[in-house]
Amino acid sequence: MSDENGHKSQVIGQFTQQAESYARLTGSMAGGEGQAVFSVLVQARPGDVVLDVCCGPGTMALDMAPYVAHVTGLDLTPAMLDQARAAQVKRGVDNVAWREGDVYALPFADGAFSLVMSTAAFHHMTNPRAAFAELVRVCRPGGRIALRDVTPEADKSAAYDRMEILRDPSHTHALTRAEMAALGEGLPVGAPALHASVAADLPLEAILAASFPEACSIAELRAMFHEDARSGEDRLGFKARLIGEEIRVSYRQTTAIWVKQ
């Protein structure tokens, strides 16, 4: 088995285990002001035909649906798509369809979509440049490609990656803001618009509930975060802190938006 096929199997294995708990975690953040802001950033239009790559349990695809004509959500993991279909029924959304597929070989024609987006996914890519080129390929000229992902500060990047690989072995590398911006170099896109934000302030326990580490235990992960929170030094890159007896974390993230030329 090639390294890439091995990693795909690891992603499917991790996200099959995570499907229900991750759907609960992201579902708790569905809708609301944050998603309305995202729709404005990507200039969502009533006529847009949208592709959500690595859609997971479908939260972002379903949140985008009221603003556009149609959304296709694509994911590698069948269990995640099962969660997406269940969420679609629960929310009564009828302009979204789901497709199983691989980000490195998207099963769509060149220029099939006016808006191509991917959120919280590129830190699982072994070759983010090749994945991004596929997003560009299926976007029509004048359309937008939007990525949103965690982007640690450069001096926290290595520590962040080490911790995330412990927590989720399918993690590869969280791009820094500069690395994300550079994805479009040499491709038919303009310079990206970059929008910095901080992801939701989350209880560590909610994240651990969607974690299936292989090299350590949940208790060991919790202890590492607890030590970091007590130190106040943010050595792990998660801004872990104690609020009473609860550890909470937050993520520095970037939304990058390119226009296809």
Image (cartoon, rainbow, N blue to C red):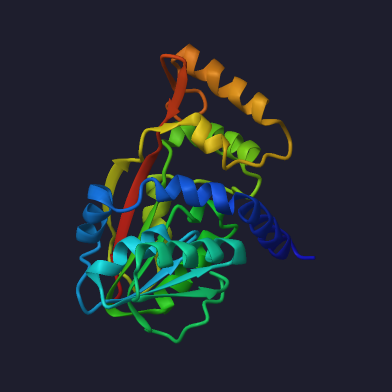
Residue name at image x 56 percent, y 73 percent: 100
Residue name at image x 52 percent, y 48 percent: 22
Front residue of 158/53: it is 53
Front residue of 134/90: it is 90
**Image height of 103 relative to 243, above or below:** below
Residue name at image x 66 percent, y 42 percent: 212
Horizontal and vertical percent for residue 236? 52, 27
Instruction: Point out the image quarter for the N terminus.
Output: bottom right
Choose top left, top right, bottom left or bottom right for residue 241: top left
Q: Residue furthest right?
A: 1
Q: Would residue 30 be seen by someone viewing this image from the given angle?
A: yes
Residue name at image x 29 percent, y 53 percent: 31
Front residue of 255/218: it is 218
In the rendered structure, the answer to whether residue 246 lies left or right of residue 60 reads: right
Instruction: Point out the image quarter for the C terminus.
Output: bottom left
Front residue of 213/2: it is 213
